[in-house]
Image (cartoon, rainbow, N blue to C red):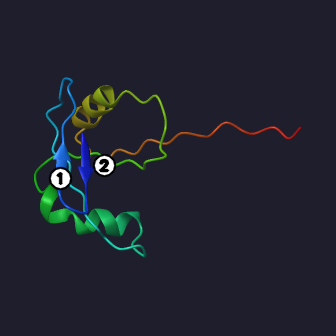
């Protein structure tokens, strides 16, 4: 899917589509992560949601993570990855 934010034009590309709802929200450049999520609070009531950074590359199985989260009755579940160390040559 391609979205042109300047004119609202949405182009869907030919392929199988997930049943997702994606919201884009401008929370301001000075807002930190917690504040960004707080700005979305009214959109997220009574529903499960996931947040990631665009540079959060990992091999976390989100399906298994969701099962874990729900089976433990948690308010929040956080995953993290340790980037590999870069060796100096």
Q: Is residue 50 left or right of residue 83?
A: left
Give me the residue at 36% from left, 65% from top: 34
Q: What residue is disc 2 on?
A: 76
- Residue 63: percent from the left, percent from the top? 28, 27
Q: Residues within 10 Å of mark 1 (few under 14, many from 20)?
A: few
Where the N terminus falls, by quadrant?
top left
Depicted 63 relative to depicted 82: above or below: above
Q: Residues within 10 Å of mark 2 (few under 14, many from 20)?
A: few
Depicted 53 relative to depicted 60: above or below: below
Q: Residue furthest right?
A: 89
Mark 2 vs 1, N-terminal side: 1
Q: Is residue 10 left or right of residue 64?
A: left
Depicted 52 relative to depicted 71: above or below: below
In which image quadrant can residue 78 be found? Answer: top left
Mark 2 element type: loop
Give me the residue at 35% from left, 74% from top: 28
Query: Which disc is residue 18 wearing?
Result: none
- Residue 3: percent from the left, percent from the top? 24, 50
Q: Residue furthest top?
A: 16
Q: What residue is disc 1 on?
A: 9
In which image quadrant can residue 19 be found? Answer: top left
Give me the residue at 25% from left, 29% from top: 67
- Residue 38: percent from the left, percent from the top? 26, 67
In which image quadrant can residue 12 be found? Answer: top left
Q: Is 70 or 41 nearer to us in this picture?
A: 41
């Amino acid at each position: 899917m391609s979205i042109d934010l300047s004119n609202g034009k949405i182009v869907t590309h030919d392929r199988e589509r997930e049943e997702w709802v994606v919201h884009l929200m401008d929370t301001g450049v000075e807002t930190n992560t917690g504040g960004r999520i707080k700005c979305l609070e009214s959109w997220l009531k009574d529903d499960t949601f996931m947040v990631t950074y665009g540079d959060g590359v990992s091999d976390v199985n989100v399906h298994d993570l969701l099962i874990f989260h729900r089976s433990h009755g948690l308010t929040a579940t956080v995953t993290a990855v340790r980037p590999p160390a870069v060796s100096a040559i």
